[in-house]
Structure formats: C-alpha cells, structure tokens
Image (cartoon, coloured by chain):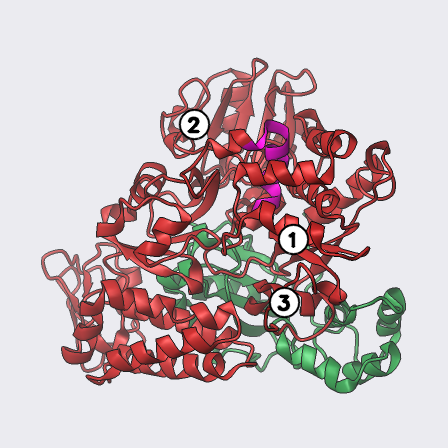
Chain colours: A green, B red
Amino acid sequence: MEKECACSNRFADVDDLGPLEEIIEHYGSEKGALIPLLQEAQDAYGYLDEKIMREIAKRAGYQLSQVFGVATFFAQFRLKPIGEYLIKVCHGTACHVAGATQITDEVINQLGIEEGETTPDNKFTLESVMCLGACALAPIMVVGDDTHGKLKPTKIKKVLKAYAGPGGPEGAEGDDAE
Amino acid sequence: MSDNGNGHRYKVVLGYGTCGIAAGATAVKDALEEEVKKGSYDVDLDIAGCMGLCFIEPVVEIFDRQGGSVVYGDITAKKVPQLLEEHVGKGQVIEDWVVKKSEDPEACEGDFLANQLRVVLRNCGKINPESIEEYIQIGGYEAAKKALTSMTPEEVIDEVSTSGIRGRGGAGFPTGTKWGFARKSPGEEKYLICNADEGDPGAFMDRSVLEGDPHSVLEGMILAGFAIGARQGYIYCRAEYPLALKRLDIAIEECHQKGFLGEGIFGTDWSFEVKVKKGAGAFVCGEETAMMASIEGQRGMPNPRPPFPATHGLWGKPTNINNVETFAAIPWIIAEGGEKYAEIGTEKSKGTKVFCLAGKVRRTGLAEVPMGYTLRQVIFDVGGGIAEGREFKAVQMGGPSGGCLPAEKLDTQVDYDQITAAGAIIGSGGMIVADNRTCMVDLARYFLSFTQDESCGKCTPCRIGTKRMLEILERICEGKGEPEDIEKLQVLAGDIKDASLCALGGTAPNPVLTTLRYFKDEYEDHIFNHKCAAGSCPALITLRIDPETCTGCAACVKVCPTDAITGEKKEPHVIDAEACIRCKMCLSRCPSESIIAE
C-alpha cells in the first residue's frame, strides 16, 4: 500500500490561498456547507489559521463569529499547526480499562510535551481522542496513519523511535500487536 | 460468499475492516497477493468486512468448491506461504490455526459464532463490501424492489410495525411508530437521516456494519425514504471512521450506476438521493436535534423538544432519524416479513441486538444475539468468559449514559425493560467487561470526565453540574474524599437528571448512580480507608514485589523512572515505597507477574 508523504511541508502555506479558493468554489452556495468547508481547509493547511477563517467568512458568506464558533465547538478542528506525526491516544472505555492513562503518561514522559503540544523539533503532536472504535485491540494509539494495538507503556519508546528518524517510519506498520 | 466464485478450487477471503487492518491485515493482503502471483495456486482472492472475531484478527477464511470453509485466525504475513502451501496446495487444514470449520461450527473458537443469531450482521464478513454485485447475488436490493414496485408506503410501515423493532441507537423507540409520525406529518419536503455518529466509547457495531455491509444500510434507507415520503437522505458519519466513509462513497456510487439511487428507482417514479455528512467530533451530535444543527452547518447544540423532528426537523422540515443498525435490519424485515422478526426476542423487545464485547472479556468482538439472552450467555457462552482466567466484576452497558451491572445481575435478560430495571441501559450496545482489577469509582470518574468534556455548555445543570460531580470523584480517587461526598453526588445526580436540556445531561449521572447502587463499598473504601482494592487509583495503592515469584530478572529496574527498585541479580527485588511514583511501568514489564498493586 502506498503511503502518503508525511514530510513536514505536506500542508499548504497559509499565505497561499489557492487551495482555499478551490474548496470554496467546490461548495459554492451549498446549504449548510460550513463544516465540510472547514474540514477540507484543515486537510489542506493542517490547521485553521485565523487568516483562513477570515477568508472563509468573507468569501463563503458567513459571519466570522459563526466560523469561529463552529471551529471551536468541534473536537476535530485545530487552531494551531501540528507536527509531522499526529499521535492520537485512544481514551475510549475499553482503552481506559486497559490502561490508556499510562500510555498517555508514557508518551508525555518520552516526548517531554503535554497533551495538545508539539515537540520542539516539530516531529510529534500529542492528542487524546475518544474511542477510535477498535476496542478489541485496546489500548491503542494512532501515529500518523498507523494504528498500534495491544500496547503497553513499556512499548511506547520503541514505537516512537521508529518515527523519530528522517524519511518516514521504519518497520512501524500497525502489526506490532503481540 | 457461499461458493468460491470464478470456478477456482479455493477462494481465500481476508477480513479487511478497521480492526483487522489495525492488527496487520494489510501486510497479510500484500503477502497473499504476492504468493498467489508467484505460485501457481488455483485460488481466487477477495476481501470482506469484519466477521466480528476481533480477538483473533487478522482473519482469513478459505472456501472450497462445495461451499465448505475453514476460518483461520491470528494470520500474519509470515504465515501466509505455509497457509497457501498446505491448505490450498495440498488440501491440508492447519489445525493449530483454525478458529472455525463449517463441518463442525462449534470446534475451536467457533462457538463464538455458533451462539449468535445474525440478522443485522448477516452479510458482514461474508461479502466484499466494495462490490454491489456480491450484495445483489445474495438477494440484495430485492426487498427495496419488492416494496417500491408492489407495496404502498403504509404497507411498508405496517410491516416494520409488525416486526416490533425498536430503534437500535439507544432510546429504543418503536421504529414503525416513528415512521408513521413522519409519514403523517404534513409537508412535501421531508428528510431522512441515518445516525452513524457512533459516539459511545466502547461501541463499534455501526462502524463494522458500514465497513462490512454498507449496502444493507443504503437499502434500509431507500425503504425508509419511500415509507415516510423523503426523497433526500443523509448519513451523518463520524470522521474517525475513514474506512466506513470510503466504503459508503463506493456503495453510493455503485447504487447510482445500478439505478437504485437517483431518479426513477426500479422503474417507478420514486426518486431518492443519499448524501454523506462527515461529523467533526462531538459526542452530543448523536442527539437528534444537535445532529441536525450540525448538518445545517451550525454548532452542534441540542434544542428543546417539542417540536419533534417528525414535524420540525432538518431545515424546519419533517425529518426521521434512525441508527445504522436499525436501517441494516429493515431489508431483512421486508424480505422475510415482520412476523418472522417478531418471533425472535422477548415480549417487548423483538429481534436481535448487536453487542460489542470489549474490556476484560476473553473473546472481544461483535456478538449479535436474540433479545432475551442473559448477560451470562452473552459474556460467557459467546464471549468465552473473563480474560486471563480472572474474576468477573461488572459489565458496563450503554456507554456514558448507561450503568454497571454486577455479578448477581448476570442472569438478567437483554431486553430494553429488564436491563433498564437492573440499572443500566441497552443503549447502543457497548458491553465493557470489568474484572477485579477495574476500580468502579475510577470508571465512574472516567465517564463523568467524558460527559463533562463533551457537554456542549448550553444548559447549566449539565455544564456545571457534571463539573462538580467530576471534582468530587477526582478527589475521592485521590484519597481526599469527604464523608458527605456520597450524599452530595446523589443530590447533584438527581438535579442534573431532572433539569438538563437533552439526554446527554439527563443520563450523565447514570454511571455514578449505578456504581453507587452496586459498588458503594468501593466508594466507602476510598473515602474512609484510603484504599483502592482493585489496585488502580495511583494515590491509594502501594506497589510491592512478591519475593516468592520474583526471579530477579531486573526487567523492572530498567523501566523504573525513579530508580525505586533495587536487588541483587537473580534474587528477589524490592520497591522503595518512598521513591515509587506508582506509575506501574514495572507492573506492565514484569514477566513473572510478581508486582502486586494493593
């Protein structure tokens, strides 16, 4: 399976409004399209910069308060840029019972960042998410596009190490469940 | 597939859902393709959705020409060459890897499936979800065709009413009645919504159905749209389910090509369109009015009811909302007849229900059983009991709106009314099994932190009430509980239930109330004795090493972040309680399970 390029410049620069124009054009005057507009803008730019939100409000015909209101209501939208790999530690019930708190604690311990923060080298951003629906493999954590299941705190160091070098993950396919 | 397709001697089907992929199915897929390409095997490869055997993914099923099959579990890329060589090449079954055999369905782990009755999951794991042809081959879209060409909308609603099916999203409202309201609601323009915003942590059946059998959901929606008079349908699906979204897109496109969606369906003058709306991550959007606000592009905040969506729904028009699982059952009901569905289940809860078994149960996965099975049958007969031979403590049902039932309630039948009477809810069908290492106070705290986080903030009882409850629970877990805390929790819980605007707040206190009902002693132990018997709450436990079983391997020494563990090589080690921060790294590392948290 071909992997998407995970290099840090995979997102458009917020000064380049080209991608945004295409997105706004695509939705035209479609009723209730604000959420998909923001989702695609985030996919293109990696996060929702103030500039992007202002442009969406102006060009797609929304109040800025409406755009900001929606962007801050839903968990998926980010107002800050993310690192090369987004780490999502699942905190669904099954993962909680299986020790997700310790998984997050150990990622924090290894990377020296808190939840919601990005490492100084721009490599990793840490997030907690509510249930990815793969409860049978609890506790799980997603790094970039790879899912790592049946984790233990002691395995975190090894998992992260695979992503630390340049040029993408080494042997980090999501099949390292025991 | 019941036969092996294109005349090949064998057909190898790989379970390719999210669970399988997370467990390494992509590597298995690559290996299968490579081996088949380079070997001269008389074999056809295909994928299917999740069979529900999540505990033993990746799963491969090999069919022979007679329709017999063998299911293998825990398949890795490394095992693929041997699997093909022995089973496909020499016709020899590799007994050690077998999960189930068609000639002896109860052998190995097969009773996981043998103890189920699959209506909603009838096609999951059996057909390629990315192929409408495979769905049509097993009778797909026949029910929709029958209804649109030979039944009136009222007859469709009657059939659904006869079946007795109740909404599988959680509330359990009779589906036929709901459709009747939407049908009778005046207005030319009506909408149909499929709720695929499976927000309950611990529930993943909607994901599995969408990934494994998206056409049955679409067919159910075509039937519902026809019945209530809606020409536009929406599927509101979580963005956390990329594979489900992808397969829905494929399925909708295929339907358009076949003429099952669009104008003039099945040669009638009926038209129906389905659009997928991707959720943006808000638990409250599972609530009908909040979901509609979100589809309209607003903050997903609920509105008071009445008016109900049946009269004033999406864009102010009559709207009917059902869950994925409900829609998936509808084609079966129309094809087989409502009466046949009503024969399954109990007096007031008809049909089957899919449960997601997770937590400390031995076989995690999807369990679809007739209503009326006991919890014991689901957890022990289907689920195979508690993992690692430990003791059952409780089952958490219904997610953050539900409750925890203890061992003495194991003989309760799964039925909307009986589970509610016992103190939990069927809800969307998540079943998280807890063993004696799960702290019930911590579990209640977990759910309150979830609802507190997901509260939309619109009404005060939910926004502030859950915050106050959470603060109390946090302090109990930290060993700072006060004697009057239990009473405070009960008073707050009552107020929040009475005064919240929507079901999120109205049910948020439930996890606390049921744990107080059945596990009050644990709360008291935390508050008065500063003890967590489950060995879970870090502030209330001490870690020690059992000198009888410690082998002195020093694995724990290497992972201890505070150098609190010392000892001679090959001699029992000791933990310095003063230096220990109770992070439990040693506990997860110890190969001889010698570290005791108490």
Q: Which residue is mark 1?
A: B181
Callout 3 crowding tier (Cα within 10 Å): few <14, some 14–19, many ≥20: many
Q: For numbered disc 2, what is the local secondary structure?
A: strand
Q: For numbered disc 1, what is the local secondary structure?
A: helix
| Residue B151 image position (x, y, % from top left) | 73, 32
Q: Residue furthest top?
A: B66
Q: Viewer-proximal residue, A48 or B427?
A: B427
Q: Chain of mark 1?
A: B
* Quadrant, the N terminus of chain B: top right
Dividing the picture into quadrants, the one containing residue A82 is: bottom right
Q: Is residue A11 above or below residue A113?
A: above
Three-letter amino acid code of the residue under disc 3? Thr
Three-letter amino acid code of the residue under disc 1? Phe
Q: Which residue is mark 3?
A: B289
| Residue A156 image position (x, y, % from top left) | 44, 64
| Residue A58 image position (x, y, % from top left) | 86, 83
Left or right: residue B485 versus residue B286 is left
Q: Which residue is mark 2?
A: B100
Residue B367 visible at all: yes
Q: Viewer-proximal residue, B445 or A131?
A: B445
Left or right: residue B85 versus residue B580 is right
Distance (Cα) linking label 2 and label 1: 45 Å
Callouts 2 and 1 in the same chain: yes
Q: Is residue B568 above or below residue B61?
A: below
Q: For numbered disc 3, what is the local secondary structure?
A: helix
Q: Chain of mark 2?
A: B
Which residue is at a point 25% across and 65% down the rendered structure image? Answer: B517
Q: Which residues are magenta?
A: B324-338
